[in-house]
């Protein structure tokens, strides 16, 4: 967050776009960053053959100009709130590819996009475009609900301190989380899930040994997280270490703490397994109703 110079906000149609824009503008203002607003269009002409659409210059121009006019009207209220504001309307039948192209062209340090909450369950729905964007983006992606941030929000940072192969990612997650907490005037809480599988418990025997093992693990977690925080130059308010699978623990902590925003790492899988199985981050995204920032790890 400290070095953020360019923020890309993806603005679609509807009332939710205003909330997404306000959140993006507040981050751009706090970071003195240039705000790049983009709208990707390829809609309203579903009954026509794609090859015909691409050949029809007049139709394509009309659609782009209409979308651009709507975008400019949406941007008017925030122009005085940010240091610099640029806008673009792109034509791409793959929405996520258009967003990534805009991010590359603008040198974006962060991509902000709206996500619609499910009215019955409260969780934030992630579309196929969202999943592709999260898998392929090389910069952090923030998916936000169409509502304003609360004052002094709780920011959660989900870590796996035992994953030494992704130590750089853990440090980046902490730094991103603290930057957001500082900008939003919130408090940072680190959450760690550690599953104890049934075979382990069966070998422990007496309950005292089981409790001792839990205490030893949580002591080790505290030591590892403190070490990561020192290396990252980050201070956090609380550490919550709970036994259980990451999806269950993180979603429950987010609910219990009324967290406003969750920062998690992603490890995109390639090929068929990536499409069918997803990864832990995607399961967490299905389970939480907070705004989410994903930071990509190699």
Image (cartoon, rainbow, N blue to C red):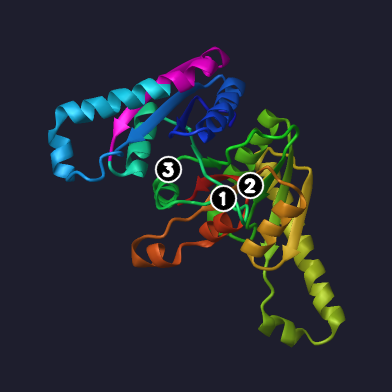
Label 2 neighbour load within 10 Å: few <14, some 14-19, many 20+ = many
Q: Is residue 61 above or below residue 256?
A: above
Mark 3 and mark 2: Cα distance apart in space: 22 Å
Inspect this view and state whether residue 233 appears: yes
Please tell me which of labels 1 and 2 falls first in the chain: 1
Q: Is residue 274 above or below residue 78?
A: below
Q: Nearer the viewer, mark 3 or mark 2?
A: 2
What numbered label is drawn on residue 124?
A: 1
Please tell me which of labels 3 and 2 falls first in the chain: 3
Q: Residue at x 62, y 56 (%)?
A: 121
- In depth, the one of 253 and 108 nearer the eye is 253
The number of numbered discs placed on residues in the rendered structure image is 3
Q: Is residue 87 magenta?
A: yes
Q: Is residue 117 magenta?
A: no
Q: Quadrant of residue 49?
A: top left
Inspect this view and state whether residue 223 appears: no
Q: Which residues are magenta?
A: 72-92
Name the residue beneath numbered marker 2: 290
- In depth, the one of 142 and 2 nearer the eye is 142
Q: Secondary structure at mark 3?
A: loop
Q: Nearer the viewer, mark 1 or mark 2?
A: 1
Mark 1 and mark 3: Cα distance apart in space: 22 Å
Q: Secondary structure at mark 1?
A: loop
- In depth, the one of 265 and 142 nearer the eye is 142
Q: Are marks 1 and 2 in contact (CB under 8 Å)?
A: yes
Q: Position of residue 14 (x, y in %)?
A: 48, 34
């Amino acid at each position: 967050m400290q070095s953020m110079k360019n923020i890309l906000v993806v603005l679609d149609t509807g009332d939710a776009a205003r909330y997404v824009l306000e959140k993006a503008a507040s981050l751009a203002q706090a970071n003195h960053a240039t705000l790049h607003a983009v709208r990707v269009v390829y809609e309203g002409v579903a009954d026509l053959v794609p090859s015909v659409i691409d050949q029809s210059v007049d139709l394509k121009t009309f659609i782009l100009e209409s979308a651009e006019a709507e975008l400019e009207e949406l941007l008017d209220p925030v122009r005085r709130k940010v240091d610099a504001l640029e806008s673009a309307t792109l034509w791409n039948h793959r929405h996520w590819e258009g967003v990534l192209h805009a991010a590359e062209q603008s040198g974006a340090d962060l991509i902000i996009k709206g996500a619609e909450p499910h009215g019955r369950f409260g969780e934030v729905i992630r579309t196929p475009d969202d999943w592709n964007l999260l898998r392929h983006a090389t910069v952090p992606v923030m998916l936000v609900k169409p509502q304003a941030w609360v004052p002094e929000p709780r920011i959660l940072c989900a870590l796996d301190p035992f994953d030494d192969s992704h130590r750089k990612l853990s440090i980046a997650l902490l730094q991103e989380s603290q930057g957001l907490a500082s900008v939003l005037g919130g408090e940072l809480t680190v959450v760690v899930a550690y599953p104890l599988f049934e075979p382990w418990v069966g070998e422990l025997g007496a309950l005292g040994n089981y409790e001792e093992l839990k205490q030893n693990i949580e002591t080790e977690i505290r030591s590892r997280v403190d070490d990561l925080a020192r290396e990252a130059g980050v201070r956090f308010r609380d550490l919550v270490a709970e036994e259980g699978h990451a999806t269950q623990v993180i979603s429950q902590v987010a609910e219990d703490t009324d967290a406003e925003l969750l920062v998690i790492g992603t490890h995109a899988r390639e090929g068929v397994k990536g499409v069918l199985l997803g990864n832990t981050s995607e399961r967490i995204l299905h389970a939480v109703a907070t705004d989410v920032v994903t930071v990509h790890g190699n």
